Every structure is written in C-alpha cells, then in structure tokens.
Amino acid sequence: MWAAVSGIGAGFLVSDLAQAVVGLVNHALLAARNELPFALFPLPTVAGSAAAAAVALGAGGQVALALELGYGALGIALRIPGVMTFCERSGGGGPNLLGPDYCSAAGFLASLWPQLVGVGLGIAFARALTARGGGINSLLRIAGSLAIALTILSLVWGATIAQTANALTSGLTIAAGMAAAAVAAGVVAAQLPRGVRNAAIVGGIWLLPWLTLQLPLGLQSLGPTVTGEFVASIIVTTILAPPIVAAFLVLSAAIASRARFVPREPA
C-alpha cells in the first residue's frame, strides 16, 4: 500500500513543480507579448501522471499501480459533477486539444488524454527506476498522504456542502477542510524518519504553483465587477488558505513528532 501512496505523492509533487514552471513560462510570455503554438497547461497532468505510475509500478509492482490508477479514476469521477454543472450553466463547453466538445461524452473522454499519455509514459519509464532496498521514502509518503487527504476532503465537501452553501461558506469550509487534511498528513509525517523536514519540503513545493500561478490569477480576479461574497471566497481559498495550510502541515508534524517522545507519568 505504501508503494501506491508513494506513487501518488510523486505525482503530486511533480505536478506541482510542473505547474510552477508553466506559471513562470506563462508570465514570461505575457510580459514579452508572445504566444506558443501549443498549450502548456496539459504538461503538469502528463508529468504528474507519469511520475505516479512509474513510482507505483517500480516500487510496488502491478498491485501498487492498480491502486494508484484507482485513485486517479476517483479523481476523474469527482470532476464529473462540476463539469455537468458548468455545462448546464454555460450551455456547452469549449473544444479541447483533441477537438470534441468538452460537454459531450466523447469530449470529456478525449479531455483525459494527458492522464492516459502520462500513465503510458510512466509504465514505460518504470523499468528505469531502481528501488533502494526496503528503505522508506518519507517525502513521497507525506506528499501522498496529503494528496489522499485532500481528495477525501473534495469527496466529502462535494457530497455534503457544495450543493447548498453559498460562495463564502463554501470557501470557508474548503479552507477548514484543507487545514484538516494538512494536519492528518502532518501526523503521518511525525511517524516517519525526518518527518518534519520532509513535511516542510512538501509544503514548500505545494506553494510553488500558488506563488507562480494561483496567487497572481486570484489577485487579477478581484475586480470591481466581482460581488463581495465572491471576493471574500477568493481571498480565503486562493490567497490566504494555501500558506496557512502549508504551515499547519509543518506545525502538526512537529507537534505530533515531539509528542511521540514526551515521557508519560505512570498511571
């Protein structure tokens, strides 16, 4: 099971790093008023899917790969209600790189090409990976635990709060859930070698796409035409929550790690 978690963690970290690079390239192109003949935004998904599949298969074999693919399929399934809502409100979706309408069944399946290409590349590259005995990769386990906790948050939030809450309530509950996910991952980190240091690394990598992509886009969206409710939601979820959640990850790892070694008085 830990091999699958490590694979998920590898995909999580590689995707974040790729998003940060894409964000920087996008800003550079905008500043130079240039455009590329192809879209860069599918690249993080391709890279993340490839890393996840390669690590899971290389470290744990076909069972770990099957678990990692099941996790990916769950993530795709969680996207379907949001896609349906978007299509109902917009009257249809725009084309993706493969052509069909995003809101049709064929279009939605075609939009999954980055995941499919990434998995194929990961399986092909898995043989190049060499597992280092029975050692524990704390960094990947922490990242995988955080990714899984965030996915569970999305599942619970979508099934309970998303259907009835307004924008501000949704933003506050998402931020609280992200903090809870970070605390859960921090507790896992406390049980692993060099857990606090690796938790800090995971938190830092997680903040890279926030700095290069999400924060600039969030600040740009705070225009005079946006209502106060949505402004508050954007500020909470996009601007304030990510660094606070990253701090929760490290602090919970440090507190839980210290609690493991505090001697208790005999009863």
Image (cartoon, grey):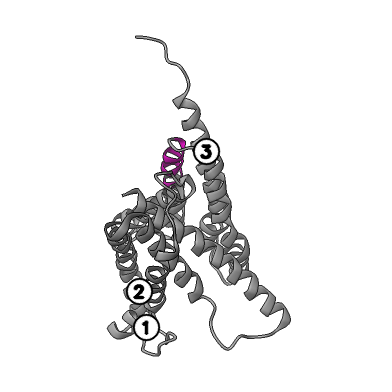
Q: Residues within 10 Å of mark 2 (few under 14, many from 20)?
A: some
Front label number (3 vs 2): 3
Q: Earlier in the sequence, mark 1 or mark 3?
A: 1
Q: Residues within 10 Å of mark 3 (few under 14, many from 20)?
A: some
Q: Secondary structure at mark 1?
A: loop
Please tell me whether residue 184 belongs to the stretch shown in magenta.
yes
Q: Residue sitting at 52 percent across and 62 percent down?
A: 16
Q: Main secondary structure of the magenta part?
A: helix
Q: Residue sitting at 33 percent across and 60 percent down?
A: 68
Residue corresponding to mark 1: 102
Q: Earlier in the sequence, mark 1 or mark 2?
A: 2
Q: Earlier in the sequence, mark 3 or mark 2?
A: 2
Residue corresponding to mark 3: 194
Res. 229 visible in picture? no
Vertical arrangement, residue 28 with respect to residue 2, above or below = below
The magenta stretch spans which residues? 181-190
Q: CA distance from mark 3 to mark 2?
A: 40 Å
Q: Residues within 10 Å of mark 1 (few under 14, many from 20)?
A: many
Q: CA distance from mark 1 to mark 3?
A: 44 Å
Q: Residue sitting at 36 percent across and 77 percent down?
A: 112
Res. 105 visible in picture? yes
Vertical arrangement, residue 260 with respect to residue 138, above or below = above
- Residue 83 image label: 2
| Dot 1 and dot 2 residues touching (CB under 8 Å) | yes
Amino acid type of the residue that numbered disc 3 sits on in the rendered structure:
Arg
Amino acid type of the residue that numbered disc 1 sits on in the rendered structure:
Tyr
